[in-house]
Image: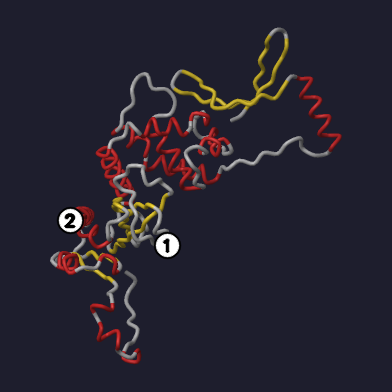
Amino acid sequence: MPHLYKKKAQGRTYWYLRETAREGRKVRVKWQKYLGTPETLLAKLEKAETDRKPLKIRSEEFGSIFMANELEKVIDTIGIVDSIVPGNKREKGPSVGEYFFYAWVNRLIEPKSKNMIGTWFSRTAIDTLRRVNTQELTSKRYWDKWDRVSREQIEAIGKAFFERVWKVRKREPECVLFETTNYYSYMASETESELFERGYSKDGKHHLRQVGLALLVDTGSRLPLFYREYSGNEHDSQFFNRIIDEMFGVLCGFNNTKQRLTVVFDRGMNSEDNVAFIDDHRRIHFITTYSTYFAEDLAAMDLKHFSPLTIRHN
């Protein structure tokens, strides 16, 4: 708990409000705020009593930060990343895993640029939960850490993350949703990139470079099972065909005890090869939308010939 701390220097007394925590045999200071000398404290108190209003009110984000920190205790993204991207003895400040943690917490609550993330955290109560100097959360430090992470390590981190999530979740999925989207960027044309290309933009920003993102989600828990990024100019059905083996390997791995598993995807992934591949899996069923190009007779039929069908959830 916070407590008053008195410090003497050159015959004068200074008061602080601080909180400490024991780590092994040592006691470290979690945070400390300077209050003033006895004279300045008395002057502030007298002024507050005269004005009948507080000298200063400060509001800090706490609830969402606390919940994110509790989630981290369960998933341990810091431990996952640091086990795959180890630090070195001369490294100071937050580890690579901790930088990952601060990035996803900010993205979860109120996304900011890497340049503003330190300022954002300084306005929260993060220092009551974790020992961090928010001035170290700079854009330059983020990219210095990020440059140490290879493509292979990113894939290993993703795999370990999903395994941890489903180890905690324990209940295996029965119905999953596969969806793709794209995110546009203001990246300059001359900037080299393997992923950011101009293509069909779902936001109508066809003149901007974009990256595609695919996500496989359990409909029951809404938790992710698998993701992949892909080039912004690659068609959804082509991408689906390219990763379908890998994705179904993940599905079968999660579905050891279930006899049936249903995959739901939209018409963007439809192609004869993709549908035939799924249809060959006896344990895996699918639901998809169908382009009227493949069902002209049904599209031309009057609606009076159709009736709603009630089915059990999932």
Residue to which mark 1 is pinned: 204
* 26 w.r.t. 107: above or below: above
Q: Does residue 179 appear to the left or right of 279 in the view shown?
A: right
| Colouring scheme, one of rainbow, by chain, secondary structure, one colour | secondary structure
Q: Residue at x 49, y 24 (%)?
A: 22
Q: Depth check: 51 or 198 in front?
A: 198
Question: How many tags in the picture?
Answer: 2
**Which numbered disc, 2 or 1, marks the residue closer to the eye?**
1
Which numbered disc covers residue 245? 2
Residue 216 picture location, percent across and down: 30, 57
Q: Residues within 10 Å of mark 2 (few under 14, many from 20)?
A: few
Label whose residue precedes the other's in the sequence (2 or 1): 1
Q: Does residue 53 appear to the left or right of 98 in the view shown?
A: right
Q: Quadrant of the C terminus?
A: bottom left
Label 2 sits on what residue type?
Asp
Residue 222 picture location, percent across and down: 37, 58
* 183 w.r.t. 158: above or below: below
Q: Of helix, strand and loop, which one carries label 1?
A: loop
Q: Of helix, strand and loop, which one carries label 2?
A: helix
Residue 10 picture location, percent across and down: 70, 7
Q: Image quadrant of residue 202? A: bottom left
